[in-house]
Amino acid sequence: MTMLTPRPPATLAPPGRGRRERKAAELEARTRLVGERLAAVSAGPAVRALQQVDSSRSGLTHAEAALRLERCGPNAVARERAPRWFVQLGKAFWNPFIGVLVFLAAVMYWQDPADPGVVILCAMVGISGLLRFRQEFRSGRAADALQDLVTTTCAVQRRADSGSAPTTFEVPMDQVVPGDLVRLAAGDLVPADLRLLGSKDLMVSQAALSGESLPVAKADTLTEDLGRPESADPVEADNLCLTGTSVISGTATGLVVATGADTYFGSMAGSLVGERPPTNFDHGVRKISFLLIRFMLVMVPVVFVVNGFTKGDWNQAFLFGIAVAVGLTPEMLPMVVSANLARGAVAMSRRKVVVKRLNAIQNLGAMDVLCTDKTGTLTEDRITLDRCLDVHGSEDGEVLEYGYLNAHFQTGLRNLMDQAVIDRVDEAEEVVVDARFSMVDEIPFDFARRRMSVVLSRNPLVAGDARPGHVMITKGAVEEVLGLCTRMADRGRTVELTEERRRAALRTAEEHNRRGLRVLAVATRTLTSPRAAYTVADEDRLTLVGFLAFLDPPKADAARALRGLADKGVAVKVVTGDNGLVAARVCADVGIDVGRVVCGPAIDGLDDADLRALAARTTVFAKANPVQKARIVRALQAEGHTVGFLGDGINDAAALRTADVGISVDTAVDIAKESADIILLEKDLTVLEQGVVQGRTTFGNTVKYIKMTASSNFGNVFSVLVASAFIPFQPMLAIMLLVQNLVYDISQLATPWDRMDEEYLRTPRNWDARGILRFMVTIGPVSSVFDIAMFTIMWNVFGANSEAHQALFQSGWFVEGLLSQTLVVHMIRTRKIPFLQSRASWPVLLTTVLAVLAGLWLPFSPLAPSLGFTALPAAYFPWLAGVLLAYCTLTQLVKSAYVRRFKTWL
């Protein structure tokens, strides 16, 4: 048996490219190969397709199907499954800072198993990891609960044996095999890639695969079909039905030519499992982590060597160096980040948003480009009647009335446009037809004629119209209906449809087509010789009444939501599989500056550099296939943008996974939800704008903690270095440094509950390792100035200038260092004047007070002797108040200068 979808070569990407680029290239090549093979199947005769899969028009036997199922495997695509709980638990602890803390705890345990610092560090590690695990595990389960399979069976024609007649019965979709004959009817999901052998009036929804909002008509096909002109995109082939699409109306028999991973859908799905590409958040955390670790690796040996040479006790110098390493490590960072992200996830859940991956919250705040589908996001995802036009393009109620009569009296399956006409009249209560007309006959719609007609009789007693005969009302494609017309309605009179008038009417329809509207023509004929039945031959000598124009209307709040995103610095680009004219019309209606619309095929011929330039200047991409959507996302990322992608279809899955933050909705296809980082329970850009603000708040509080802690710790270590060089004893015991660090870090656990200044939330925020380093070396030494001032006060004023009085010196510096660290939080958390122009949230204020009280209490507490403290004299506290006031004043002045110089703060 010949399989129709080849496996691509293993080495499709040039050597030297990153794993992410190689995988993307492999996806593109595989999808292209599958598309080419399907296009060849479409172009060839049906008998060749049967030969290629070794099947017949009677279908497979049960035995053949069982053998093929064993050989080819289930008809299922690769799906991303949540890792087992213990794998998730392990990943929650996989963090550079946690690694540093575990290493330091191991060293401290090796030195002294009874050291309380070991317990402190282990507690920090445990709380941080468990907090992250709990939130991600719960979010993953909530996302899994959203997945709901609509149907699991399909109708397949098979034979008991080679001599038996074929029978049709239901089989599970995952047991369909190449060579099966599948029967399709309205409401069915297409279970595999099918070559149509026979079809009648088949309308297929391809929105999940192509993004096109309206159903697509497939050709009426016979078993002897000789094929179609080869199409570059198999989705556009009218004798193929692909996995993931669904039948709206009509019937068909299709030959299964590919299943599972070998389908067009499967070629995309295979790339959506395994390790995800690193996001903006991942890159940023890695940069910051290794910046701080490198800084620690430089400073700790310096402190160790200086202490060893000046004090002569290398063992104590080593322990002190370990304590300094802990002091330099923002050990609460994993916990603060996890708490920040978890709080953001909880806040977003109240807005009907499920956060599957916590890191996505920060990426949402950093996002400066949002690529979004059109259907259902900018639009209502429903067809409405937009206008009823006479032949000159003016509104005409008579056109609506005739269109309504045609839609109301037809007995076949109403399509979306028929329903839109009926909804328009029902809402306005403009036409009452039940008593005025009665049904005589109808000529149903078919895809060869592309029109349908109803024949009605008037009730003269109700309608007040005694004209004899029946009236035929025909509605359909403009070209087909116009070709049957010999007269037209023109402002209340009927005139001959001359060639000039025909061209003018056609221009009216084409003008509205260019505006992105789907246009149907409406025509009538009075039949003066009534009879009971009518045929297609009677659809002749019609009078053109006018046109009905339809569209998927923009959401009422879409324009406001887009303005809100623009105000937040997020550029919106529309990337859709729908028609370019329709996309341009909708985008213009919601206030997007359309410019030039770029269609998907134009992208294929561009190299990466050209595509980056094109993506930067283009707002609307139309007719884009899944590979092209993912390439557009990568091109924007290559230009330094943090890219979000909002989509709900199969054709969006690759782009959702490639983006820094993939966003889908609960009504999306399963593969889109699996690929997304965030799932909206309402497909609403307003909710997304709120998510952006929440993401920036989360990021701002994280950066706030990093900058406060890094600059404060740097200042402390710098002070230690200076003190170690000139003071004959340790300026602070190792256990004191650990306790100071612990009290300060516990006070910072309230940071996730702090508020951010409104100005900060207006622009996208990203990690800036260089900015953090600059902040640290600028603000950190300010605290050292006052540490040294306190050293001088303790040495000269209070006589703590010998080893006999070192406990007083250490206690005095401990209190000043802890209080200055804690209070400066309020100076650093905002670029404004604290307490006057910007006030911290009450949890931050509360923890500040508690940390200050703890610092003042410890030297007088029962714990003081075991920690090496001694009680401070009353005269110390006025000096302390003066130093802290001077410190806050100088910090505010330095902050103002820093903002003027670098135009930024947090």
Image: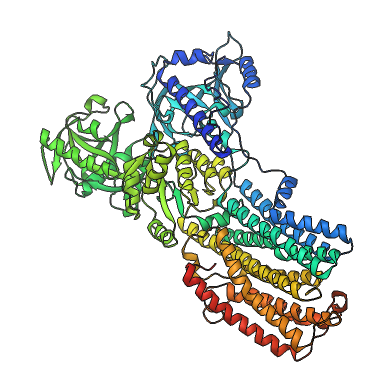
Q: Residue at x 28, y 52 (%)?
A: 430
* 538 is higher (above) or lower (below) than 723: above
Q: Let me know if residue 171 appears in the view.
A: yes
Q: Position of residue 871 (x, y in %)?
A: 82, 85
Q: Position of residue 262 (x, y in %)?
A: 55, 26
Q: Let me know if residue 57 appears in the view.
A: no
Q: Furthest residue to the top?
A: 163
Asked if residue 168 lies left or right of residue 324, the reply is left
* 899 is higher (above) or lower (below) than 402: below
Identify the image quadrant of residue 799: bottom right
Q: Quadrant of the C terminus?
A: bottom right
Q: Quadrant of the N terminus?
A: top right
Q: Position of residue 142 (x, y in %)?
A: 63, 50
Asked if residue 783 lies left or right of residue 368, the reply is right
Counting labels gives 0
In front: 605, or 63?
A: 605
* 264 is higher (above) or lower (below) than 622: above
Q: Residue at x 71, y 77 (%)?
A: 817
In front: 781, or 697?
A: 781
Asked if residue 567 lies left or right of residue 527, the reply is right
